[in-house]
Amino acid sequence: MPSMLELVGRNPITYESASEKETNIINQLAYVPATKKLYENLWQQREAIGALTKRHLGLGSKDACTVFDPQAWIRGSFNVCIPVEVKSGSLSRKVVLRCPMPHKLAEAKYPGTVDEKLSCEVGAYIWMQDQCADVRIPHLFGFGFSDGRHFTHVKHRPFYVRIARMFWRRIYSFFRYPILSQYTRNRTSYDVRTAYMLLEYIGPDTGRVLSDTWDTSREDPGRRQKLYRSMARIILSLARISQPRIGSFQLLLVR
């Protein structure tokens, strides 16, 4: 047995230290090879990721989408975010492909967990974009499920698709059906074999992660008051529309 045990997102620990912890270290050890395998699979599909990004953004054949090296990827507790550089003419920007990590969601044991998680997150994004426009969230360009279904915001689709969607949204509204979202099916031969969301990249010119400044600024009364007021405005905006029950949003697909 090795003297040090490798864990994801933290320094290696000794066997003696692991045996004293109450957390399931054995389960965490399995995350290491699973994370490496996921990274390898996604990196091997970088051309498909670039092509899907172009598809969702409605770019032309002369535009380029380049996936950043894995060293630049951002990994959280349940997702990995892949930065993609987009070059269109003289303009350059970044977007982020956010993929759930199946091994963190017990996908192998409970098939469909990843798609269900994505459906809930997408549902929340769509609802907030429609109902709480005053709350600044990253723009959701598009998303896809592990079964190969892809959806794109209508603002990035051809003119005739936007017109058709607007027509059907009004029809649904007239008959008081649940309003259709702004996302339409976008069929493509490219597939990354995983669920994903393509999101706007929030850079330092727009904002910073709270954890970056929390330790240095949390004792500042002015900044703390601004934080609390901002959080209160978000809660009030979300609470303007009453919900019939406690739960999570979920995307319902109209066939």
Image (tube, helix red, strand yellow):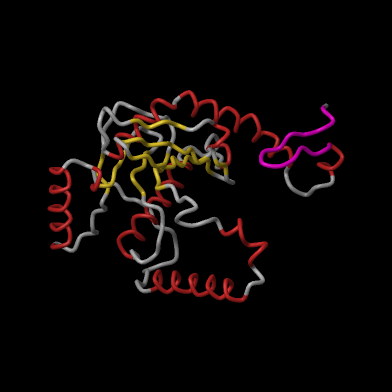
Q: Which residues are magenta?
A: 2-14
Which quadrant: the N terminus?
top right
Identify the residue at the far front of this view: 90
- Which one is nearer the viewer's eye here, 111 or 99? 99
Quarter of image, res 104 = top right
Is 5 magenta? The answer is: yes
Q: Is residue 112 left or right of residue 161?
A: right
- What is the total number of numbered labels drawn onto the structure image? 0
Q: Who's the residue at 34% across and 43% down the image?
A: 142
Q: Is residue 215 left or right of residue 100?
A: right
Spot occupied by residue 169 in the image (x, y as percentages of width and height): 18, 55
What secondary structure do most residues of the magenta stretch adopt?
strand
Which quadrant: the C terminus?
top left
Placement of 12 over or under 254, stated as above or below: above
Spot occupied by residue 111 in the image (x, y as percentages of width and height): 48, 37
Q: Who's the residue at 81% across and 41% down the image?
A: 18
Spot occupied by residue 205 in the image (x, y as percentages of width and height): 46, 54
